[in-house]
Image (spheres, grey):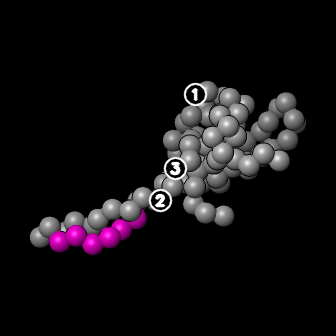
Amino acid sequence: MSKICQVTGKKAMVGNHVSHSKRRTKRKFRPNLSVKKFYLPEEDRWISLKVSAAGIRLINKKGLNAVLKEAREKGYILNH
């Protein structure tokens, strides 16, 4: 599976390393991802999501059900 946050949709971006002499070479900015388990009390089960640090903060703020609903609508999580 690719390195994409399942909550926010963040993925790697391309940019430049800029040295002291202003020489530019390509690099990647990768999101801060971790695999974390969350408990869904409505379904009485644990789900495992690959989320960024910002995604974990969003879940803490809005709640797991609201965030999962938005992620499904935007296509970050496949409906199953």
Above or below — where is 66 with respect to 1? above
- Where residue 12 appears, as percent x and y from the top left, is 47, 59
- Where residue 65 appears, as percent x and y from the top left, is 72, 31
- Where residue 55 appears, as percent x and y from the top left, is 56, 41
As drawn, the label of residue 61 is 1
* Magenta-drawn segment: 23-28
Q: In the visual, does 13 lie left or right of 16?
A: right
Q: Provide the residue designation for mark 2.
A: 12
Q: Identify which residue is drawn at 70% across, 40% down.
A: 72
| Residue type at the position of mark 2 | Ala
Above or below — where is 52 with respect to 12? above
Q: State which quadrant residue 26 falls in.
A: bottom left
As drawn, the label of residue 5 is none
Categorize mark 1 by other alpha carbons within 10 Å: few (<14), some (14-19), many (20+).
Answer: few
- Where residue 27 appears, as percent x and y from the top left, is 36, 68
| Residue type at the position of mark 1 | Lys
Q: State which quadrant residue 45 falls in.
A: top right
Whether residue 64 is visible: no
Q: Nearer the viewer, mark 1 or mark 2?
A: 2
As drawn, the label of residue 10 is 3
Quarter of the picture holding the N terminus: bottom right
Categorize mark 3 by other alpha carbons within 10 Å: few (<14), some (14-19), many (20+).
Answer: some
